[in-house]
Image: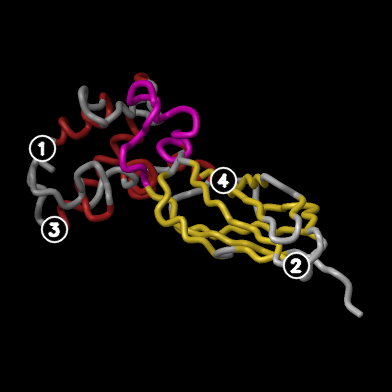
Amino acid sequence: MVGPKAVMIIDNKNANLGDVDWGDTAKYTYVIHNNGSDTLRITAIHPSCGCTTPSLDSYILPPAGKAHLTAAFNAGERAFGPFAKSITIYSNAAPQGMVVKFHGEVVMPRTPHRGVIGIQGIFSGQCAECHANRGNGQLGKPLYAADCAICHGVKTDGKPGPDLLTMQKQLADTDVYRTILNGKPGTNMPAFDWNHGGPLTGQEIRTLCQYIRAERSKSGIAKSGLF
């Protein structure tokens, strides 16, 4: 004769968090039910990585009882792009080690740099991971991809800055250099020069200008003395 047993049932074991702004913490709450005739005892919850923090409001569920497992995903600890995470739940119910999952995509914040004091703040703290550190030791095209393309590109990709490689407006070479060097007051364009708290030297900025000019020349946009 089979005695009473606990039966764990979880609503929606594979959650879609959709787009999550980099730097935000996204949360999803799973509802755990005990559909058995014995007490369900949850003994442990293990996330798949350190960017996920699980919390459970009850580890002991009587028959017909329920609990809430909240997964908090820290998007500031992930690079841009798709993610898939999981939490394993151990209990006295079969099967041992039931897994819940969630997925989504880390994207550039819709409101860039919330909480940053002054636009130069993007070169320090967590923001530096995307806006400064990736370009360390790079020049020209790789430096542009690391430090510029995160903000400059086509609007359909959610980039807040103009696409410097294809925009039709022409500027003097010296103006482009000075804008990267000193920033643009009153906008979200920071000063990249080392002397202003930025991550780049004057020579590194010159290689950016050379790359931008070369790319614009390929499509016939750049003219003598102009980008």
Camera-near label (3 vs 2) is: 2
Mark 2 or mark 1, earlier in chain: 2
Viewer-side residue, 55 vs 190: 55
Viewport quadrant of the N terminus: bottom right
- Where residue 148 appears, x then y in whole percent? 32, 42
Q: Are marks 1 and 4 in contact (CB under 8 Å)?
A: no
Does the image show residue 137?
Answer: no
Mark 3 or mark 2, earlier in chain: 2
Camera-near label (4 vs 2) is: 2
Residue at image position (46%, 42%) is 134
Around disc 3, counting alpha carbons within 10 Å, would you say few (fewer than 14), some (14 to 19), or many (20 or more)? few
| Residue bounds of the magenta highlight | 108-132
Q: Residue furthest bottom?
A: 1
- Where residue 46 appears, x then y in whole percent? 72, 53
Viewer-side residue, 205 vs 123: 123
Q: Which residue does the numbered mark 1 point to in the structure image?
A: 171
Say which element carries label 1: loop
Say which element carries label 3: loop
Q: Which residue does the numbered mark 2 point to in the structure image?
A: 36
Say which element carries label 4: strand
Residue at image position (30%, 43%) is 151
